[in-house]
Image: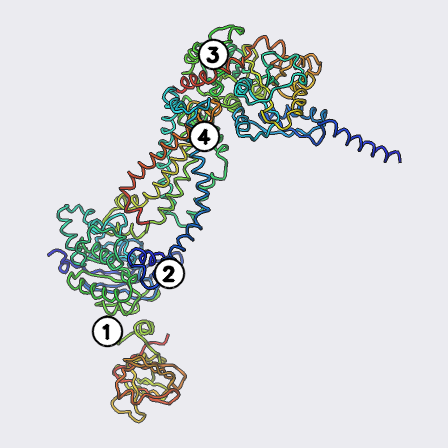
C-alpha cells in the first residue's frame, strides 16, 4: 500500500548548529541525532529555541553555522522546496483559496504527479486521517480538528522521509487534543516516518514520543526516552520542567551523601563532593512511622501544612526542618486515609533508596 | 461748544440724508468678475472709486460664467447684484431672460459701441485674441497673420489654438482663409470649420484656459498660439521671448448685467452707470491691458499717449481687428460648438 | 442572541408556548430599535445619494424648452464627439488602471515584505502625494514632461534622443499624470490585503515542494486578489470621473467625460444636457462594476468569503 514510509525513513544528523539574531544567541553549538523512523520531540519553554531549530530543519531560517544531514546528505544550504520534508504548522497554514482536495493534492501537483494518481493518493490520505468524502469542502467549512487532519494529510501525502510538526495540537481543545495525540502516535507507528515534533506541553511529549530532547536557552539539556527522562533527570531544569518536583539540598562528602545529619541511602554512587539537590517527586514520598527506618527508606522529618483532598488522591504540603516545602501525593486508599495527619502536626516522610535522584545545584 | 453743535448737526443731517436717499454706507452690493489680475484692476479702476462716490460698500465675488448666473436665477438664490460675462454669454442669457432690464436714463450709453448696448446688458471692456510667436524660434520673422499661422510649410513649429472658445477659433479660422476683417461676420461656419480642419493635424494643444495658453507659450511647449492680449502682455512684460500685435486680432467684448432678482437693483444700476462712465473706464488701461468699452475714455486725457498704442480698444487698434458679434453667436453658438468639438476630437 | 431565539420561536413554535407572546414582542421591539438606530444613516443616504441622483435623472429628460424629450440622450448619437469622448474616457481609465497595477503590485509586494518599521516609512512616501493638491502635482508633471521639460532636456543632453519625446499635452501625458495620482489608491488596499496573507501559508507551499516562483503564482497572487480587485475598482471608477489632470495634461486632445460635462453644462441653457451625461456615466459604470464583480467574484468567491 501507499504511504508506507517505514523502509525509506532516514536518520537526521544535526551538528554544531549556531543561530544568532544580532547579538542574541538563539542556538549555540547544538547537536542532535534523530534515529531513522523515530518520533522525537523537542520540548522546552517558549524562547528555548525549539521552533527555531525546526525552522532551520525545514529551511525557513538560515543558521549561522552547522550541518544537517538527512541520510548522510547535507541539506543545510538546500532551499526549502527541495528538501522533501513534510511539515504541519501550528495554525495549519491551509490554503484558504483551495478546497480540501486541492490542498492535499498541492505537493503532488508540484511533483507533476498524474491526475489519476493524484486522485488516488489524495483519497487514501483522506482515508488515513478519516476525512473520507470531504474533498470538496472549503477550508473555512471545516472544524479545527478537521483542519488539523487536512494539514497532516497534506504533509504526508507526498511520502516525505521526514515530517516536522510545530505544536500542531495547541489550537485544539483539551479532549480533542488528547484524542489527536493518540491518533498521531498510531499514524506514526503505521507509517514509520522520522518525525520531529515541537511542543511546550510535557504531558503531550511524554504521551507521544520515542525520545524527548529537553531544550533550554538554546541548548539541549537532556535527550532520553520519556520514562528515563522522568525517573532520572540529569539537571535541575529537566527535573523541574518534566513532572512536579521539590528540591531538597544535600551534601556529598567522603563518598557519602548527607541530608543534614542523616546519611542518605541510595542505589547510585555518590557524586563529587559539594552541595547537590535531591529531586523529590510527590508520588515518591510517603508517610512513615517515626521509628520505621528499616527497608532502605530515607526519613525526612517535617511539619504538615495544608492537606488537599482531590477525590482519587490527596496532596499534602509539608515543611521540612530547614523551612523548605515539599509535596506528597498519594491515592486515597483507606490505610493511607486512616493515618492522614492534621495541619500543624509533625510527621516523617519517607523516600526509597532507589528513588533518590541528585542533580547539581546551579 | 460750536464743535459739539457741529457734530450734532452732522449727525442729524446724516440721519435725514439716509432717510431721503437710498444710497448710504449701509448699502452693499456684490459684484462678481473673473478674479485674478483683471479683477484687481477693476477694483482699482471701477469698484473703489464707485464705492467712494456713492458711499456704498461693494463686495466682490468671482464667477465661472453664464451657468453660475443661471444657477442663481433659476434657483431663486441671487447673490450678485452685478456680474461680468462674455458678450456672447450676455446675448444668450438675455434670450433666456436671466437679467434685469437696464435703465439708460441712469446709465449714459454714449461712447459705447451700439452692438454692446442692449436692453439688459452693456459692454464693459474688451479682450483681444491675438497671434503670439516666440522670437527665439522665429526672430522677428514669425507668423504675422492667421494665414501665416495656417502655413505649416513656411512656418514649421508647434502650434496651439483655443479648444474651449469655439467662437474665437472659428473667427481666426475665417481670417486664415483670407477673408477681410470687415467680412468675417456673419461667420461662414462650415467654411471656418473647413479651415480648422486644414490645420488641426498640426495643432499640438487646444488650450482651455488663459493660464494654459500662457504656460504653453512661456515654457516653449508651442512656438506660436492664439492667446488673449492680457496674457500676451504679461508674458512680454515678464521678459519672455515673444512677439504679438493687434493685426488681425479678434476683439471680444465683456459685458455686465444685473441678474434677475437682484435685491439691490437700483443701487446696482447707479454703480453700473459709474463703471461705464468715460472717467472710470479710462482708469482700466492704467492697470491692465484690457481696453475700455467706452471710447470716450480716450478723450478724458487720463490715458498717457504712449500707452494708447498698447490698448486693444484704442480707435487706432480697433481698426486692425475683427469685432466679435454677440448676437450672431447667440443664435449659432451651440450648433457651431458641437460641430467644432466633433472636428477637433476626431 | 435574543433575535435568533425569538425568531425561531416566531417561526417554529406555536405562540402559546411558554412566554411565547412576550418573547415575540421582545423580538419585535428589538427589531424596531435596530431600525431606529439605522434610520439617521438611511435618511442621509436617501437625502444625499438617492434624491440627487433621482433628480439628475429627472432633469435629463427635459430639453431646452422644458419639454419632456429624449433630446439630451439623442445628442450622444448625433454628435460624434460624445462617442469619441466616451471611448477616450474608458481608454484612459483602462490604461491608467493597467499602469497602476504594473507599478503598484510590485510596490505593494515590496512593502509587504519589508520589516514593519521600514514599511511604515516607505508607506509615508506612498501617502505623501495625497497631501499635495492634484493641481500642483499635475503642473509638476507638466514641468517634467513637456517639450523643454526635465526629461526631454536630460535625454537630449545625454544624446539618447535627437527629438523631444511627446510626453505632455497628449494621451501619454494624461496617463502618466493620472497614474501618479491614482497609484496610492491601488497600493493601499493591495498592501493591506498582502499584509493579511499568512506567512506560514507561503512557507507551507515551499515546504510542499513549490519553488518561490510557483509559490507566488499559486498561493501569494491568488490570496492578494481581493485587495487587487478592490484597488482596481477604486482606481477605475475614480479615473472615469477625472477632470483636472486630463484638462491640463491632455492639451485639449484628450477630452474625458467630466470635462465634457463641464463644457455641456455651460453650453446648453438646460441642466438636462449635462445631467444626461451624468446618468449615462453612472449607468455604464454600474454595469461595468457588475460585470467585473461577476467575472472576478465567481473565480475568487472562496477567497472573498474567507475574509
Sequence-wise, the earlier of marks 4 and 2 is 2
**Residue pictured at 42% horizontal, 39% vertical:** C184
Q: Position of residue C201 (x, y in %)?
A: 29, 51
Mark 3 touches mark 2? (CB < 8 Å): no
Provide residue B215's location: percent of width, then percent of height.
Answer: 51, 24
Residue situated furthest front in the rendering:
C16
Q: Are marks 1 and 4 in contact (CB under 8 Å)?
A: no
| Residue projecting furthest to the left | A1
Quadrant of res A256: bottom left
Residue hosting label 1: A227
- Label 1 vs label 4: CA separation? 78 Å
Labels 4 and 2 in the same subunit: yes
Q: Which mark is residue B173?
A: 3
Q: Residue C22 has which mark?
A: 2
Residue at point 29%, 41% (across, down): C297
Mark 3 and mark 2: span between their CA atoms? 84 Å
- C-alpha separation, residue under disc 4 versus residue under disc 3: 28 Å
Quadrant occupied by the N terminus of chain B: top right
Who's the residue at 16% across and 60% down the image? A191
**Where is residue A152, by image quadrant?**
bottom left
Camera-nearest residue between A50 and C261: C261
| Up-down relation of residue A284 to residue A56 (above or below) | below
Mark 2 lies on a secondary structure that is helix
Amino acid at each position: 500500500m501507499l504511504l508506507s514510509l517505514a523502509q525509506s525513513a532516514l536518520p537526521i544528523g544535526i551538528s554544531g548548529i549556531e543561530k544568532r539574531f544580532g547579538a542574541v544567541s538563539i542556538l549555540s553549538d547544538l547537536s542532535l541525532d534523530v534515529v531513522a523512523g523515530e518520533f522525537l520531540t523537542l520540548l522546552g519553554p517558549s524562547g528555548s529555541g525549539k521552533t527555531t531549530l525546526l525552522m532551520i530543519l525545514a529551511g525557513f531560517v538560515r543558521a549561522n553555522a552547522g550541518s544537517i544531514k538527512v541520510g548522510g546528505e547535507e541539506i543545510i544550504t538546500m532551499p526549502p522546496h527541495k528538501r522533501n520534508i513534510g511539515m504541519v504548522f501550528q495554525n495549519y497554514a491551509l490554503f484558504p483559496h483551495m478546497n480540501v482536495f486541492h490542498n492535499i493534492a498541492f505537493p503532488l501537483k508540484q511533483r507533476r504527479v498524474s491526475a489519476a494518481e493524484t486522485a488516488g493518493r489524495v483519497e487514501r490520505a483522506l482515508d488515513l486521517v478519516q476525512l473520507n468524502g470531504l474533498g470538496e469542502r472549503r477550508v473555512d467549512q471545516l472544524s479545527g480538528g478537521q483542519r488539523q487532519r487536512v494539514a497532516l494529510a497534506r504533509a504526508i501525502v507526498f511520502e516525505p522521509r521526514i515530517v516536522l510538526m510545530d505544536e500542531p495540537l495547541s489550537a485544539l481543545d483539551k479532549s480533542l487534543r488528547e484524542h489527536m495525540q493518540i491518533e498521531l502516535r498510531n499514524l506514526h507507528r503505521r507509517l514509520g516516518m522520522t518525525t520531529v515534533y515541537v511542543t511546550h506541553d510535557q504531558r503531550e511529549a511524554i504521551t507521544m514520543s520515542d525520545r524527548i530532547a529537553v531544550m533550554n536557552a538554546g541548548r539541549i539539556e537532556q535527550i532520553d526516552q520519556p520514562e528515563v527522562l522522568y525517573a532520572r533527570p540529569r539537571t535541575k531544569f529537566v527535573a523541574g520542567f518534566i513532572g512536579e518536583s521539590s528540591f531538597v539540598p544535600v551534601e556529598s562528602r567522603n563518598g557519602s551523601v548527607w541530608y543534614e545529619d542523616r546519611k542518605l541511602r541510595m542505589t547510585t554512587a555518590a557524586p563529587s563532593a559539594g552541595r547537590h539537590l535531591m529531586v523529590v517527586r510527590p508520588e515518591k514520598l510517603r508517610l512513615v512511622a517515626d521509628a520505621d527506618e528499616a527497608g532502605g527508606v530515607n526519613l525526612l522529618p517535617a511539619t504538615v501544612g495544608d492537606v488537599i483532598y482531590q477525590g482519587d488522591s490527596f496532596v499534602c504540603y509539608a515543611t521540612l526542618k530547614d523551612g523548605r516545602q515539599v509535596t506528597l501525593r498519594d491515592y486515597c486508599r483507606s490505610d493511607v486515609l486512616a493515618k492522614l495527619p492534621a495541619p500543624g502536626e509533625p510527621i516523617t516522610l519517607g523516600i526509597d533508596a532507589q528513588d533518590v535522584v541528585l542533580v547539581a545545584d546551579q | 461748544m460750536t464743535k459739539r453743535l457741529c457734530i450734532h448737526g452732522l449727525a442729524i443731517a446724516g440721519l435725514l440724508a439716509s432717510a431721503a436717499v437710498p444710497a448710504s454706507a449701509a448699502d452693499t452690493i456684490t459684484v462678481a468678475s473673473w478674479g485674478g489680475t483683471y479683477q484687481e484692476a477693476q477694483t482699482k479702476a471701477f469698484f473703489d472709486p464707485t464705492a467712494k462716490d456713492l458711499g456704498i460698500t461693494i463686495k466682490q465675488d468671482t464667477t465661472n460664467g453664464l451657468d453660475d448666473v443661471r444657477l442663481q436665477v433659476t434657483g431663486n438664490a441671487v447673490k450678485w447684484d452685478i456680474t461680468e460675462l462674455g458678450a456672447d454669454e450676455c446675448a444668450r442669457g438675455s434670450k433666456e431672460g436671466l437679467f434685469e432690464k437696464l435703465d439708460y436714463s441712469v446709465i449714459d450709453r454714449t461712447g459705447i459701441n451700439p452692438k454692446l448696448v442692449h436692453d439688459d446688458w452693456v459692454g464693459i471692456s474688451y479682450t483681444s485674441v491675438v497671434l503670439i510667436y516666440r522670437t527665439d524660434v522665429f526672430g522677428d520673422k514669425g507668423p504675422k497673420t492667421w494665414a501665416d499661422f495656417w502655413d505649416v510649410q513656411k512656418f514649421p513649429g508647434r502650434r496651439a489654438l483655443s479648444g474651449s472658445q469655439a467662437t474665437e477659433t472659428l473667427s481666426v479660422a475665417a481670417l486664415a482663409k483670407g477673408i477681410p476683417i470687415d467680412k468675417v461676420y456673419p461667420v461662414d461656419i462650415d467654411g471656418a470649420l473647413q479651415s480648422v480642419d486644414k490645420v488641426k493635424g498640426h495643432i499640438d494643444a487646444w488650450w482651455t484656459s488663459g493660464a494654459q495658453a500662457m504656460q504653453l507659450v512661456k515654457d516653449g511647449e508651442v512656438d506660436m498660439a492664439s492667446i488673449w492680449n492680457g496674457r500676451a502682455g504679461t508674458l512680454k512684460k515678464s521678459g519672455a521671448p515673444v512677439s504679438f500685435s493687434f493685426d488681425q486680432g479678434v476683439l471680444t467684448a465683456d459685458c455686465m448685467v444685473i441678474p434677475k432678482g437682484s435685491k439691490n437693483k437700483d443701487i446696482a444700476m447707479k454703480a453700473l452707470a459709474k463703471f461705464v462712465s468715460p472717467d472710470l473706464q479710462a482708469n482700466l488701461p492704467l492697470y491692465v491691458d484690457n481696453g475700455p468699452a467706452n471710447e470716450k475714455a480716450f478723450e478724458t486725457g487720463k490715458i498717457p499717449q504712449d500707452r494708447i498704442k498698447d490698448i486693444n480698444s484704442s480707435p487706432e487698434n480697433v481698426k486692425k481687428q475683427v469685432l466679435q458679434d454677440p448676437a450672431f453667436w447667440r443664435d449659432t453658438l451651440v450648433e457651431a460648438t458641437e460641430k467644432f468639438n466633433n472636428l477637433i476630437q476626431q | 442572541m435574543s433575535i435568533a431565539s425569538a425568531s425561531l420561536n416566531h417561526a417554529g413554535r406555536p405562540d402559546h408556548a411558554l412566554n411565547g407572546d412576550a418573547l415575540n414582542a421582545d423580538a419585535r421591539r428589538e427589531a424596531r430599535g435596530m431600525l431606529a438606530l439605522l434610520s439617521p444613516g438611511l435618511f442621509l443616504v436617501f437625502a444625499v445619494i438617492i434624491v440627487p441622483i433621482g433628480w439628475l435623472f429627472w432633469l435629463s429628460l427635459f430639453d431646452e424648452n422644458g419639454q419632456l424629450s429624449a433630446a439630451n440622450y439623442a445628442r450622444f448619437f448625433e454628435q460624434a464627439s460624445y462617442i469619441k469622448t466616451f471611448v477616450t474616457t474608458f481608454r484612459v481609465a483602462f490604461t491608467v488602471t493597467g499602469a497602476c497595477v504594473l507599478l503598484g503590485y510590485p510596490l505593494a509586494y515590496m512593502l509587504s515584505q519589508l520589516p514593519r518599521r521600514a514599511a511604515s516609512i516607505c508607506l509615508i512616501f506612498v501617502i505623501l502625494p495625497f497631501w499635495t493638491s492634484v493641481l500642483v502635482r499635475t503642473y509638476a508633471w507638466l514641468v517634467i514632461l513637456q517639450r523643454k521639460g526635465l526629461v526631454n532636456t536630460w535625454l537630449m543632453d545625454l544624446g539618447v534622443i535627437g527629438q523631444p519625446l511627446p510626453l505632455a499635452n497628449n494621451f501619454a501625458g494624461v496617463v502618466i499624470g493620472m497614474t501618479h495620482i491614482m497609484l496610492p489608491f491601488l497600493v493601499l488596499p493591495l498592501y493591506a490585503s498582502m499584509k493579511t496573507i499568512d506567512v506560514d501559508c507561503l512557507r507551507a507551499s515551499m515546504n510542499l515542494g513549490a519553488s518561490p516562483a510557483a509559490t507566488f503564482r499559486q498561493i501569494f497572487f491568488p490570496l492578494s486578489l481581493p485587495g487587487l480587485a478592490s484597488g482596481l475598482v477604486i482606481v477605475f471608477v475614480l479615473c472615469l470621473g477625472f477632470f483636472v489632470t486630463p484638462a491640463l495634461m491632455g492639451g485639449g486632445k484628450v477630452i474625458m467625460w467630466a470635462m465634457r460635462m463641464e463644457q455641456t453644462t455651460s453650453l446648453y441653457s438646460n441642466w438636462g444636457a449635462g445631467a444626461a451625461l451624468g446618468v449615462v456615466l453612472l449607468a455604464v459604470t454600474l454595469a461595468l462594476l457588475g460585470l467585473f464583480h461577476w467575472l472576478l467574484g465567481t473565480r475568487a468567491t472562496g477567497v472573498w468569503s474567507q475574509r
